[in-house]
């Protein structure tokens, strides 16, 4: 098996971006680091393909990202990981933002048709047959982020497991009447989290009641917004049976649900326990129990994977699935303090 820049980076104790800069003659590498990388490469018998290196030097220094709902904190954190990683290379990031999932195809066409990008990231978009055909025909580096297709590189988190762990936590705290506040069902992560919700109920021998799932049809952030969570919680409170435990498919929805709970003269966790999803910064300040996603790490890994593809275009495609974890705060437990703590109690990986 040929030696790759991953092997060199691992043995030299540097990033693949640093290895790439060394081989491309970048001046943004110290003499000691350059010497170390070249020595490791020689020791491993690395032989960069001369033609590939020549072509790489003539490629664009731009990598593109097609992102729906750019203002969503989840995407902002992943982008931070991307940008921090790319900042150590010669590549600049160009973002194509779609306000809704319906606009993704147009922005994807723009990114692909320009023909100037050395690689492309595609975020959180269902992989329809048409999209897969377009992306498979793209001859440059490509990584899916928060979405999946078996024939393409991807970096995702296990949303089904996350939904299951969130639900199981509520069952373990004694909740009997569970409800789910669901984002727009066109969102694949939201669908996976619902599947996890249903699976946890089935595993516990609990009956699934479809009337306890409130699904958003809001186009604003595809339902991942505070108002949709607020409206969904009001609907649940007005039902015949009020839930005593609620899973929301995002933190912002959970925060909206908490507002509705307060307005109804109720409180969490005394009357209704609430679990969100993502662990955005505000979740820590309001004491929200949530499923933490490694958002920044997703960005770093996606950037490193794209850089590796640029260096070795023929390498085998890989799908990386990261594990979320449950963070317990005061919306499900009175035993973790005021909720102002920066992290809460991490009780395990999903």
Image: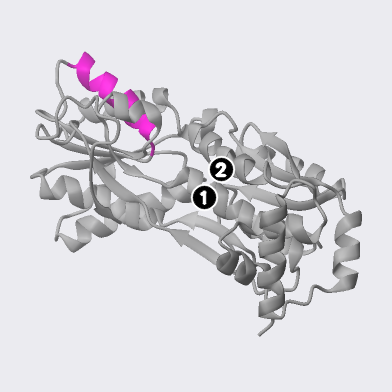
Query: In the image as oriented, which residue stretches furthest toward the bottom?
Result: 1
| Earlier residue among tags 2 and 1 | 2
Please provide percent x and percent y for residue 186: 52, 45
Compared to residue 162, the image places residue 92 above or below, namely above
Q: Which residue is mark 2?
A: 81
C-alpha span from label 2 to label 1: 7 Å
| Residue 96: image location, x then y, percent | 72, 37
Q: Is 127 within the magenta?
A: no
Quadrant including the C terminus:
bottom left
Does 67 sit above or below residue 324? above
* Residue at the (35%, 55%) spot, across then down: 195
Left or right: 35 as drawn, with respect to 214: right
Q: Which stretch appears magenta? A: 250-264
User: What is the image's colouring?
Assistant: one colour
Q: Is residue 259 magenta?
A: yes
What's the mark number on residue 298? 1
Q: Residues within 10 Å of mark 2 (few under 14, many from 20)?
A: many
The x, y position of residue 329, in whole percent, is 21, 35
Residue 75: name its quadrant: top right
Disc 1 crowd rating (10 Å Cα; few below 14, some 14-19, many 20+) is many
Question: Can residue 285 be seen in the rendering of this structure?
Answer: yes
| Residue at the spot 37% in from the left edge and 41% down from the top edge | 249
- Mark 2 falls on what kind of element? helix
Q: Evaluate if marks 2 and 1 touch, with contact meaning CB atoms under 8 Å apart.
A: yes
């Amino acid at each position: 098996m040929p030696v790759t820049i991953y092997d060199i980076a691992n043995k030299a104790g540097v990033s693949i971006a640093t290895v790439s800069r060394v081989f491309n003659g970048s001046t943004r590498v110290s003499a000691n680091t350059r010497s170390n990388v070249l020595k490791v490469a020689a020791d491993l018998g690395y032989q960069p393909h001369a033609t590939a290196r020549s072509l790489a030097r003539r490629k664009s220094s731009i990598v593109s990202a097609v992102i729906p709902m750019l203002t969503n904190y989840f995407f902002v954190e992943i982008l931070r990981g991307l940008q921090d990683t790319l900042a150590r290379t010669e590549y600049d990031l160009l973002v194509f933002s779609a306000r809704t999932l319906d606009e993704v195809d147009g922005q994807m066409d723009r990114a692909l048709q320009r023909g100037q990008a050395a690689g492309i990231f595609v975020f959180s978009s269902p992989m329809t047959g048409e999209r897969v055909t377009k992306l498979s025909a793209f001859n440059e580096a490509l990584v899916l982020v928060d979405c999946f297709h078996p024939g393409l590189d991807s970096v995702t988190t296990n949303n089904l497991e996350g939904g299951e762990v969130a639900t199981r936590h509520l069952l373990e705290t004694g909740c009997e009447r569970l409800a789910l506040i669901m984002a727009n069902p066109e969102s694949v992560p939201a669908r996976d989290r619902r599947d996890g919700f249903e699976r946890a109920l089935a595993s516990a021998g609990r009956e699934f009641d479809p009337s306890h799932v409130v699904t958003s049809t809001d186009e604003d952030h595809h339902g991942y917004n505070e108002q949709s969570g607020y409206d969904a919680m009001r609907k649940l409170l007005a039902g015949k049976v009020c839930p005593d435990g609620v899973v929301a498919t995002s933190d912002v929805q959970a925060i909206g649900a908490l507002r509705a709970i307060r307005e109804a003269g109720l409180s969490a966790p005394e009357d209704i326990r609430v679990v969100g999803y993502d662990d955005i910064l505000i979740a820590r300040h309001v004491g929200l129990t949530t499923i933490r996603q490694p958002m920044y790490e997703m960005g770093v890994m996606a950037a490193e994977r794209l850089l590796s593809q640029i260096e070795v275009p023929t390498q085998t495609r890989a799908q990386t699935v990261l594990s979320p974890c449950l963070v317990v705060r005061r919306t499900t437990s009175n035993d973790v303090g005021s909720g102002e703590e920066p992290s809460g109690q991490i009780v395990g990986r999903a």
